[in-house]
Amino acid sequence: MVAEDQYRLYNYNVERTSSTLVLSFTHNKTKRKYIMRNVFMTAFAALTIAGAASAADLSGSVKMEVTENAAGDVVNTTTLGLGLARTGVAFGNIGLEINDSSTLVVDEYALGVQVGGATVSVGDQGDLFPDGGLEMVGDDTLADPADHDSVMVTWGGASAMIGVLDMSADATDIENIQLSYGTELGAGLSVTGVVDMNETTDLNTYAAEVGADLGVASASTVITYVDSHLAYELSMSAMGVTGFINGDEDDMAENIGLGYSRDVAGGLTLYAEGAYDLEAEDDKIGVGASFNF
């Protein structure tokens, strides 16, 4: 099946056999075919072949967020998501996103296998570093190491990641290595430590996260340290309300924020958030809605 329209930014072609589904895109202006990564196509083929015996889990999401931009205009950002996953001894997942510019991107993908008590996976699958923030605000001061294609190994509470700068160009060009270990201390307390060793910059980035689940309320503290610079974010949540404060060694109270989230029904979640930069005396306020199916 081929869809063409002279007014479209791109055309698409869908070819299906009994076991494989292949999508390709052609840009109207240049007529160059977008070739998806070999690993992505391999993942898709593996999942669709397995569909003859048992269908993979399909999920989708629609997210709309209304905020004020730098020009003072109130704007809406819409993101559509589609996910396909298969679990088992061998597993894989693909996450696709379409934004307001109608650009289809592969947000994440992974192929993996369980070996004894360990799992090994390869793909664009995030990293091991903890983060902070709410849906739209927060996570302003914490260190954020590089995140590209990677190989991950997880065994119990220990994880290791080898990040590659561009796997399609040189799969041996290692960018960073991350090691992580997390454990439950009992009484609702948990602690996780992570180190990122960047092979390009020769910088080590450290992070620690301490969480407490008290039943009616929860709290979390994330601390990062890189190049002699310390930063943190502290958050507390109760009855759908979350507040946070973050900063660094130069300004321990840099940003404060508050958010409220409520699961309405049938996969629909509504949320409202706001943050205030105490140093710049600037605020950010937004509302959003997400639907997952």
Image: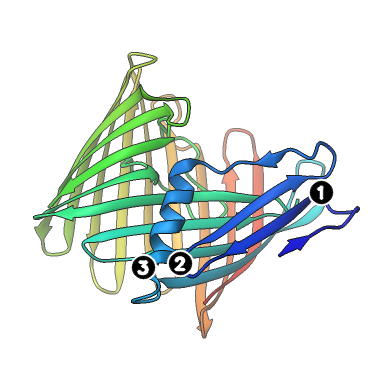
Up the image or down, 11 lies above or below 238; here it is above
Q: Position of residue 236 (x, y in %)?
A: 37, 59
What residue is drawn where x is 69% and y is 41%? Answer: 33
Do residues under tags 2 and 3 come within 8 Å of each other at their CB atoms? no
Up the image or down, 288 lies above or below 39; here it is below
- Tag 3 secondary structure: helix
Which mark lies nearer to you, 1 or 2? 2
> Which label is found at residue 50?
3
User: Which quarter of the image is occupied by the N terminus?
Assistant: bottom right
Q: Position of residue 127 (x, y in %)?
A: 35, 41
Q: Position of residue 221 (x, y in %)?
A: 31, 47
- Tag 2 secondary structure: loop
Q: In front here: 257 or 138?
A: 138
Left or right, 85 with respect to 136, comes to left
User: Is residue 25 visible in the rendered structure shown here?
Assistant: yes
> Which label is found at residue 19?
2
Up the image or down, 52 lies above or below 144; here it is below
Left or right, 267 with respect to 272, comes to left
Q: In front here: 114 or 201?
A: 114
Q: CA distance from mark 1 to mark 3?
A: 33 Å
The amino acid type of the residue labelled 1 equals: Leu
What residue is drawn where x is 34% and y is 76%? Answer: 53
User: Pointer 1: what residue?
Assistant: 9
Residue 192 lies in what quarter of the image?
top left
